[in-house]
Amino acid sequence: MPIVTPLTKLLGIRVPVVQGGMQWVGLPQLVAAVSNAGGLGILTALTQPSPEHLRLAIRETRQKTDKPFGVNITLLPTINPPDYEGYARVAVEEGVKIVETAGNSPSKLIAFLKSQGCIVIHKCTTIRHAKASERLGVDVISVDGFECAGHPGEDDIPGMTLLARAAQELKTPFIASGGIGDSRGFAAALALGAAGINMGTRFMATVESPIHQNIKETMVKSTEQDTVHIFRTLRNTARVYKNKISKEVVAIENRPGGAKFEDIRELVSGARGKMVYENGDPEYGIWSLGISVGVIKDIPTCEELVSRLESETEAIIENLSRMRVERAKL
Ligand code: NAD
């Protein structure tokens, strides 16, 4: 029995699994593979050097899939300020119907996307922000727990409680993000009231993920202990792979007197982090990674991964309902 939720109906997808925006990873080959597998692939706008490059990436994705896919636009501090409006305009011009937004002060961007008839999935790390985005008219809220890769916000509420709170407070459908890498997490998210899941880290370790094989293998060998938070003292916290660079950043931040962004800029730059995915050296720079890396034990194709998530989650749901029947017999 397929897993039908408000998300599958709204987005026109078979399995309620979204591949969340990932800097340097959300490229056409991965996005198309996820969408072809029945989930929703998402292109990361800022991975493209300009809005016109995003236009080409959207066209390339369309050549690889005729299924729905989205574009992610993230509004967070950056070394070079991006042309957010330009990326949004190009996505709309190219007929993209689903946009994932994330980050700070999104109201202008969301108003523009809604005025153009887009379905907006907005990522939030607190109930306060989720309720504010509900007032802005977003269609789906991606509720992002503390376990997530990248930016978890500053409130540190893990998914188990954050999702239960979302179910209590939100009227808008929400999906569970952060910490989910297998069918157990998927079923738990549905039980907590989510209409689907968002996974980033798990999709990094797939055959179609456009990162170096050595990084995928490093992920398989890693455990849930292998991430660390940087930027805590700058209130731009990010969960990343624990390596010598991220440890050095934390040490600089914890120096007496603290650190300014300039003190760590060279170590943390995205351009350097991107090299990790190209040269396969996990120690070379900063790369985002979620705690769910602990449950990743293989490097499947997206088709294998999404099918497995679907069938195993269906089996878990069946087992849980059988538990009720068997309890009734006692
Ligand atoms: P970048 O090279 O501009 O910056 C590297 C890191 O430093 C980023 O985490 C950024 O947030 C942080 N940073 C930059 N200026 C800062 C400041 N003044 N104070 C505190 N922190 C600062 O980043 P990039 O790799 O080119 O990525 C572009 C943007 O996309 C960043 O905001 C990044 O956080 C964000 N991002 C998006 C995704 C996604 O899924 N869409 C994933 C990871 C990062």
Image (spheres, rainbow, N blue to C red):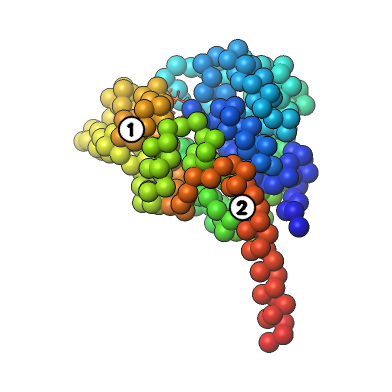
Residue 43, x across and y down, in percent? 60, 28
Residue 231, x across and y down, in percent? 37, 35
Q: How many marks?
A: 2
Q: Secondary structure at mark 1?
A: loop
Q: Residue shown at 58%/47% (left/top)?
A: 305
In the picture of the structure, the residue carrying the numbered disc 1 is: 281
Residue 262, x across and y down, in percent? 31, 22
In the picture of the structure, the residue carrying the numbered disc 2 is: 308
What is the three-letter code of the residue carrying label 1?
A: Asp
Indicate which quadrant contains ligand 1.
top left
Q: Is residue 182 above or below residue 233?
A: below
Question: Residue 101, which numbered label?
Answer: none
Is 236 or 95 nearer to us in this picture? 95
Residue 211 in sight from this viewpoint: yes
Q: Secondary structure at mark 2?
A: helix
Which image quarter holds the N terminus?
A: bottom right
Q: Residue shown at 74%/50% (left/top)?
A: 5
Q: Earlier in the sequence, mark 1 or mark 2?
A: 1
Left-right relation of 68 to 160? right
What is the three-letter code of the residue carrying label 2?
A: Arg
Q: Residues within 10 Å of mark 1 (few under 14, many from 20)?
A: some
Left-right relation of 253 to 110? left
Disc 1, ligand 1: is the CB inside 8 Å? no
